[in-house]
Image (spheres, rainbow, N blue to C red):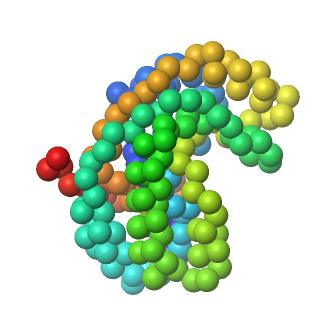
Amino acid sequence: MPVILLAVTLPSELVKNIDSNYPFLASYAALSPHITLIPPFNVRDEEVNDVIKKLSEELSLYDKFSISLDSVDSFTGENNVIYLEPDTDSYKRLSDINKEVTSIVDNFIDKRQQEKAERPFIGHVTLGKKIPNENFLDLLEKTKMAFIKLEFVCKSISVYQLNDNWIKLMDISLNQDI
């Protein structure tokens, strides 16, 4: 069964900015910076095209919008994550899209996956994860010291599929007429 991920992919110039501003986190970055809209989910082979079609139909109705990443925060625990957090308005827009995507995907996934997808949505851009406890606080402080506010316009939602690595299948364009 294919594993699918829906995310806001950051523009390449913003990724370069992040890479140059936080080089000390590079070894802890799993993927290129992005905002996951829903946890990765399995879908039957024969339903991949149906899922993408339905997502495309619904997401294309959303207007493009600005995302402002205005602070550094973290999750602690077994994964120890340092991330950039969107401002309140950006977070609201991302949450609205998360709800729409979840309602669509729920029609294609099993109950166990639905429970996983029902975890609270915390939109963020992961800079580093699985940071060892002995390095975590120092790297978090260093990240906060290096922080600069970043902004971009979200014009599309990316659909990825996991093979050996995440492969982008397509970008779903948001409504550009605003």
Residue found at the very far right of the displayed protein: 134
- Residue farthest left in this picture: 177
Report the residue at 43% width, 27% height from top: 150
Q: What is the quadrant of residue 80 in the picture?
A: top right
Residue 116 position by quadrant? bottom right
Q: Residue, x 48% and y 69% (percent of image)? A: 102
Residue 143, horizontal then vertical, whole percent: 63, 22
Give the vertical position of 89 relative to 105 (above or below).
above
Q: Is residue 169 left or right of residue 69?
A: left
**Residue 104 in the image: x percent, y percent?**
41, 75
Q: State the image coordinates of residue 142 (x, y, percent, origin top left).
A: 67, 18
Q: Looking at the image, is 15 positioned above or below residue 123?
A: above
Choose between 162 and 148: the one closer to the eye.
Answer: 148
Give the mark count: 0
The residue at the point 30 percent across, 55 percent down is 171
Q: Is residue 161 above or below residue 2?
A: above
Residue located 29% across and 69% down the image: 58
- Residue 166 in sight here: no
Q: Is residue 27 visible?
A: yes
Tell which of 131 and 98 is nearer to you.
Answer: 98
Front residue of this view, candidates 101 and 108:
101
Q: Position of residue 141 (x, y in %)?
A: 71, 21
Q: Is residue 45 left or right of residue 176?
A: right
